[in-house]
Every structure is written in C-alpha cells, then in structure tokens.
Image: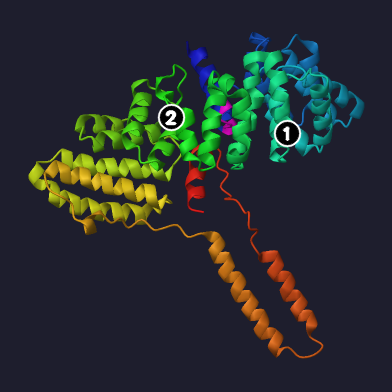
Amino acid sequence: MADDNTFAEVKRLLDEGRDRDANAFVQRQGFDGLIPWLREQHHAEPADAWRLDMLCRELWRQNETARIREMITSEAVDSSVKCGWEVLVEAKEDQPEALETALSRLVRLEASREDFPAFIERELASLKALRRLDAALEAAVADDSISMSFAALHTRRLCLRKQWDVSRHFDQWIQRAGDAAALPVAAFLDVVGDLYEAGTLLPDVIAKHGDWMKRQTIPFGKAGYAYASSALFAETAAWLDGCETREDLQGWIAANHITALWALHRYEEAGTVAAEVLRRDLRDATWDWNAAAAAFGHALAGRAAETQAALDAITGTSSKNAEFQWAAELARSVLRALKLPRSESKRVLNEERQRLAMVLQKHSLKLDHGSASERYELALKAIAKHGGFRARSWQLRSSIQKPVNPLRSWWVIGGLLLVLLAVIRGCIKPGEEGVIDFLEEQRKSEQLPMDAAPTSQEEIDKLLQKPQQLRSR
C-alpha cells in the first residue's frame, strides 16, 4: 500500500509539473532522485506509457539523448511514446531524414497521453523544427490518415493563425473516427473562444455539426465557452440550456452557463444549475465558482442552511474569479442577516454595505458593472425582505466602478499627441524637420490598434474572465 501511495503522490506532482517537489519526495523515500525511481517504475511496468514518458522527460532535461534512445529501442514500449521520443532525439541530433520519417509515423498514431502532442510541439519549437511538424501534419491530413489527437494539434495550430477553413475536414473526420473526432472539433472551439470569434464562426459549424456536438461532452461544453467568451450570452444560455440535467455535466460547463444566466438576469436558474453541481459533487477547477454561485442563489431565496453549506464547500483551491468572489461575498452578507433576528436586519444592511465597499477596495475586483451592481442590489433587497422593510434607493447604490474603455484613453492620448505635434510644428525652425519625422514615428508606434483584444491569457480563468473583459469594451 505504501508503494501505491508513493506512486500516486509522485504521479500527482509530476502531472502538475512540480518536478522539484517530486524529486524531493522520492529522495525522502530513500531514492537518489527521480531518474532512479522512474527507472525502477518503468522496469516494473514496461508497457505503461506514463512511466516511460516521465522517465524520458527527466533524461531529456539532463540532455541524456543516448540513454533515451537506448530506452526506446531496447524494450517493448508504447508505440506513440516510442515514436514521439524518436522524433525528439532525431531533431536534437539534427538528423533531418530520420526526423521526417519519425514524424510521418507519429502523426498517424493516437497519442497515449493527452498532453503528448502539445509536449512534442513545444519541444520541437525549442529545436526550431516546427516547419517539419506542420509538413507532416498536412501530409497526413491530405491522405486522411492523421490520428485525431494530432488532428487536434493541427487544428489548433491553424486556428491560432486564423485559418478557420480547417473546419472543412470535420465531416470527413467525424465519419472516419466517430466520437474521437471530438478532439479536433474541441480544439477548434477552444481557439474560437480564446480569440472571441464565436459570432462569425459558430453559427455555420453548429448548423453543420450541432446535433453531433450536443452528443459529445467536450464539444458541447467548448461551444458554450466560445459563446460566453465572445460575450454572446443569449446564445450561450440557449446552447447550454438544460445542461444541469445531463449525465455528463461538468463543473466548467455549468460555470459558463451561470455566467450567461447572470448576464441575462436569470438568477434563479443560475442558482439551480450551481446547486446541481454541488449536489453531484462535480469537482474540477471551477468547484469554488459553482459553490459561490449556489450560495448566492440560496441566499436570495432566504435558505440559510443551504447558503452556509454552499459557502462551507468553498475550498480556496480554485483559481480566482472576480464575479464568483463577489457572489460569495454577497451570499455572506445575506447569510449574516438570515442568522440574526429580523429586528437586526436594518443594522446588518448598513454594516454590510460598508463591508462590501471595503471588499471592493481591498481586493480590487474587476467586475462587470451592470451584472455585479444588480446582484448587489438583489442581495440587499434580500436582507430587507428578511427584515420586513424596504431598502431605500440610496442604500441600493453600489460603489462598483464603471469600467473605462481603454480605447478611449488611447484616443485621448492620441489627441494630445496631435495637439503637441501642432504646437511643435508651429514653433520649429527651418532645418529641424527631422524632429517632426521622429515624433511622427513615435506616434505611429505607440498608437493602439482599433481591433486590439484583451490580453489576459491565464489558462484556467479563460473559461470565465474573458467574457467580463469583453462586456466592458
């Protein structure tokens, strides 16, 4: 049992990218380091792709390509991991013909590990071999032999260059690979959401493949993400409608649905969706977000015990999200009133108004003004309802700052620069035109493009933070 526990802990640490922690852990177990431990694990289970891959990655970090070649040629190993490491070794040793041959085999094999294609891509980028990768991917697409895991990589690479017509292959891939084609379709939808292109691209894709996508968990959820990220909240809610009743519901899918429902003022429905996530214990990186949303929904309904239970479910391990942090704070305010005699409600309302203003100031929450202000008002009305009085309009006003459009600031700066140029032009002496040229170049280099997009790229918060940024534009 101890060995099983050790393996599980090291696997968790390595899968989270915490190599140093894993190395320290195995040393405490009596090993010299990760490589001896992984070698022993690989010999115990030579067919296990994870053990071989992790061992090769550690050897790769030590620049031990000869030992990697020995590992993948001397024993029966997983074919995709074997071929993938052949690719990297040939690239590292600058063997172009062998590299092309290995790449041609690799892109036609299904990856045994989910992150393996992205890992191969990243390492080939560091070795300046991405053109060879793209050539191998295109050749496999052309003869319709590409595996779906590498079709997903190919799709993502093209979409990041906005070559959206890669979607023309979806019909062929769905017919050939069936459910496995969810991988490239999901990759397409992911980038569509990241680049806020759902409004122009999703209608056509859904018209062609919508029925199939709804039967697939990840494409179904990713389409909801793409709509929400593009601030198309009515479309998000319509697409994800009823997701809480699906057997394959996942927390991140619900979180996108809740964001859309909040934007559409459908707070009771949002609370229902979030409560179902908690009821079914659907834990993922958005667990705290759903717990906060469930707490807010229960608080508005005056359910003290359920509100407390939902707040207690917050673990503090999910990534921060301002809108859901705000929902949790509002739920705490209402809960405080629900736990006290009704005669205390007026005092609680005024004290919580002050506390919430301090929360905004302390945490600098970047909130959507409309939705966050409306939820603030609903929370205070819930306190007033519990106390049997009517909150006054001045009490319902929030201190949430309206977002400033960054483009306006740049237009102001641009206007000031033009005025300054005019003044300088009026004062400049003959023969000093070079100064004007320099200032003109500075103005051009500093001007913000009209189509500039928000720059937040934090991976896990992309599910929900980007919609809030977009709504403020």
Q: Colour scheme in the image?
A: rainbow
Left or right, residue 389 beside residue 116: left
Residue shown at 68% from the left, 25% from the top: 116
Q: Position of residue 370 (x, y in %)?
A: 38, 50
Q: Nearer the viewer, residue 256 or 32?
A: 256
The residue beneath circle 2 is 254
Which residue is located at x 61 percent, y 23 percent? 209
Which residue in the protein does label 1 denote? 165
Q: Residue at x 60, y 51 (%)?
A: 453
Q: Quadrant of residue 24?
A: top right
User: What's drawn in magenta, residue-wise?
Assistant: 15-20
Q: Amino acid at mark 1?
A: Asp
Q: Quadrant of residue 332?
A: top left
Provide the secondary structure element on which disc 1 rests: helix
Quarter occupied by residue 261: top left
Mark 2 or mark 1: name the one nearer the start of the chain. Answer: 1
Front one among 359 and 427: 427
Q: Is residue 259 left or right of residue 454?
A: left
Crowding at mark 2 (Cα within 10 Å: few <14, some 14-19, many 20+)? many
Q: Looking at the image, which is closer to me, 304 or 224?
A: 224
Residue 423: percent from the left, percent from the top? 65, 85
The residue sitting at 53% across, 25% down in the picture is: 220
Q: Is residue 218 above or below residue 326?
A: above
Give how far across and how far down residue 128 sits, in percent. Answer: 81, 38
Asked whether 275 falls inside the magenta stretch, the response is: no
Crowd band around label 1 with a 10 angstrom C-alpha radius: few (<14), some (14–19), many (20+): few
Label of residue 440 in the image: none
The spot of residue 143 in percent (x, y) is 83, 19
